[in-house]
Amino acid sequence: MGIPVIGVAPLWDDSRGSLWMLPGYMAGIMNAGGLPVVLPLTSDEVVVRQICLEVDGLLFTGGQDVSPGLYGEETNALCGPLCGARDEMEALLFAEAVINMGKPAFGICRGLQFFNAALGGTLYQDLPSQFSGAEPIRHKQEQPMGEPSHSVTLEAGSPLGKFIGSVSIEVNSSHHQAIHKLSPELAPMAIAADGLVEAAYMPKKRFLWGVQWHPECSLQDESSQKLFAAFVSAC
Ligand code: MN
């Protein structure tokens, strides 16, 4: 057994017409003993299938809002910028690698939202105007992303609760969308004080975890290190 190879969904910068990558995603995987490989942005089914065969796991990164068409809604005026090419590629990756092949996958921010949409759940297209929880929380923080801005309560019986081993953790928060209706295929792993599901997993799969926060921006935190460690060891 060599080092597990983890395909990383590429980020897309619309203004430059360019792929890019945040070093934290790469470092998080490497620090945990994995070999991250940034994938090309393609929806060629033959290429995507080959990618799925080559990798031991997939990281679904943050990025643009998920296209509402994926969960059967019209795009409303306050939905953020979309990236159709990522939606298309990630739908193929998800169906082939995760659903058909059962390979481990970890979703961060958009990644969690994408998993939920792909499995029949829905999203808030614009969290600030569509959601008000019992306890108001800022989900778009102003301080640096290395610093936490709200806490989440870990579900004691969930894999994340067991793995982290504490009642709650402090997390950063920079999301415009969030899970509205949780997919029936997913179960919650962490919940914010306002009631939003901030982490979920798919009980039928060996490792399909998603988190709404950004562990790649807070690699100094033990909980972030543990998340990447859990993912890479599953790969
Ligand atoms: Mn949040």
Image (cartoon, rainbow, N blue to C red):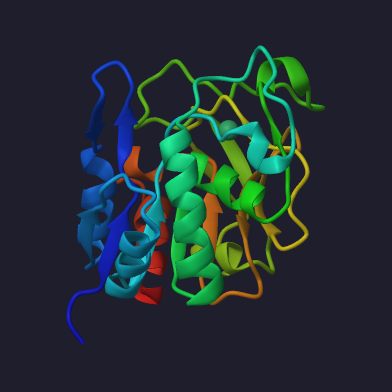
x then y, percent, for residue 144: 35, 22
Note whether residue 93 is visible. Answer: yes
- Disc count in the image? 0
Q: Residue furthest top?
A: 77
Q: x, y (%) of residue 90? A: 46, 50
Q: Which residue is at 68% across, 64% downward?
A: 156
Q: Quadrant of residue 55?
A: bottom left
Relative to 96, say whether 216 is above or below.
Answer: above
Vertical side of 168 occupied by 231: above or below: below
Looking at the image, is 232 positioned above or below residue 44? below
Depth check, front residue: 160 or 184: 184
In screen coordinates, is 132 left or right of 68? right
Question: Residue 105 appears in which quarter of the rendering?
Answer: bottom left
Whether residue 222 is visible = no
Q: Is residue 36 left or right of residue 175?
A: left
**Residue drawn 40% across the image and 66% down it:** 231
Residue that lies at the very extreme toward the right in this rendered image: 134
For the point 75% across and 49% down, the residue is 182
Q: Is residue 131 above or below residue 77?
A: below
Q: Quadrant of ligand 1?
A: top right
Residue 232, x across and y down, in percent: 33, 68
Residue in front for this viewpoint, 234 or 105 = 105
Q: Which quadrant of the figure contains the N terminus?
A: bottom left
19 and 230: which is toward the camera: 19
Q: Residue, x 29% and y 63% (percent of image)?
A: 6
Residue reaching furthest bottom?
1
Q: For the C terminus, which image quadrant?
A: bottom left
Figure quadrant of residue 52: bottom left
Q: Position of residue 67 (x, y in %)?
A: 58, 33
Relative to residue 186, is residue 90 drawn left or right? left
